Amino acid sequence: MRIARRAQRIEPFYVMELAKAASAMAAQASADQRPMIYLNIGEPDFTAPPLVAEAAQRAIHEGRSQYTPATGLPPLREAISGWYATRFGLSIDPGRIVVTAGASAALQLACLALIEAGDEILMPDPSYPCNRQFVQAAEGRAVLIPSGPAQRFQLSAAQVDAHWTAATRGVLLASPSNPTGTSIAREELERIARRVRDRGGITLVDEIYLGLSYEEAYGHSALGLPDGLGDEVISINSFSKYFSMTGWRLGWLVLPPALVPAVERLAQNLFICPSTLAQHAALACFAPDSLAEYERRRAAFKARRDYFIPELNRLGLQVPVMPDGAFYAWADVSGLCERWGLPPAGAKPDEGGSWALAFEIMRRCQLATTPGRDFGVAEPGRYLRFSTANAMAQLQEAVTRLEQAL
């Protein structure tokens, strides 16, 4: 059977490969062995709060499961608009909001609407691997630009200037970022957006972790950029992380008004509509009791960060930039690789470095982590990602096991 070239270009998602290996190791463990601790997947241990679950049950009981408009339930679009107003002080027209089947569908729709074959999109290295696959699926090319700790693992306006070519269509940023949990300073984001606008390009910003910002200096949306820049940004968001609805597969886009009809046509043909039951449930996310619960959870995530990052640093797994959002620790483990006699990262990403270390930690500590292989090509063997989405007791046990192994 002939497989299309676009499908052959899509790389495996190695986070999931490690997850399978961890699950297999856990299944083979004897009864007296320690259970596996999973700090590899970026999924909150919290699930949808009670009001959201109750709203889903009511929708099922009342038979509210028919198709919705392709752009989403109007009350949900209005509720999202209200959240921007109360949380960020932004006035977002609900007509600019398109509800999608998760942030993945949002990215697919945005890329298909804006990227032509051969267009190049500038992205930081490291960055979330699926984002560049959406660019490639739209026949574009993701240009990964090494972005180290000195610039918070984010693109700078100077890099945009240096790498912009006749083929460049725009930039795809993430703030806060997966895998680093770092955000772009507001002033730098404004400079990037101006550079892109001056060149007639597009600025896409993945903001799915925006609700989980912990520092006032970084907890801002690109939609609030001045001089009309925010009106031109394409913002991608999700109910998965802050709203704890990962498996419900619900997200949204905020678009420039002129782009909404094109995205709506694509959504009608590709998805019909997002999950109706998930949309009815998500309306309860914005109830006062639910929002209060989400803020309690945000405080819990911050407390986990504040405990875990210093502990990694103490153990010599240095996190060069303190994450200001999300629930990740991007640790430089090159010293540990050398200490444990592991081969350095080779020409192939599965030779040595953090890839080998992830399996060694799994063997020695029964602790699943994520090597840098997924997130870029600049220094994938140098870094290991830990997810702090687990309960504090799990993080404390993980530190104990690492300390024993060291």
Image (tube, rainbow, N blue to C red):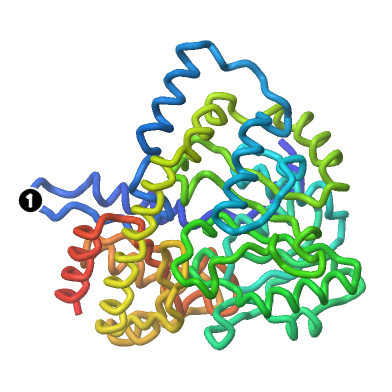
- Return the residue at label 1: 32
Residue drawn at the location 18% of the way across and 49% of the way down: 29
Picture quadrant where residue 167 is located? bottom right
Residue at point 62% right, 46% down?
A: 104
- Which image quadrant is residue 165 in? bottom right
Quadrant of residue 99 in the image? top right
**Image location of residue 126, percent across then percent down:** 57, 72
The residue nearer to you, when weighing 152 against 286, is 286
**Horizontal side of residue 402 vs 192, given as left or right:** left
Comparing 136 with 27, the one in front is 136
Q: Nearer the viewer, residue 2 or 276?
A: 276
Amino acid type, label 1: Asp
> Residue 206, image x and y in percent?
63, 58
Visible residue check, residue 242: yes
What secondary structure is found at the residue carrying circle 1?
A: loop
Residue placed furthest toward the left: 32
Q: Is residue 398 left or right of residue 355?
A: left
The location of residue 260, given as percent across then percent down, is 82, 42
Q: Please tell me which residue lies in front, 251 or 292.
A: 292
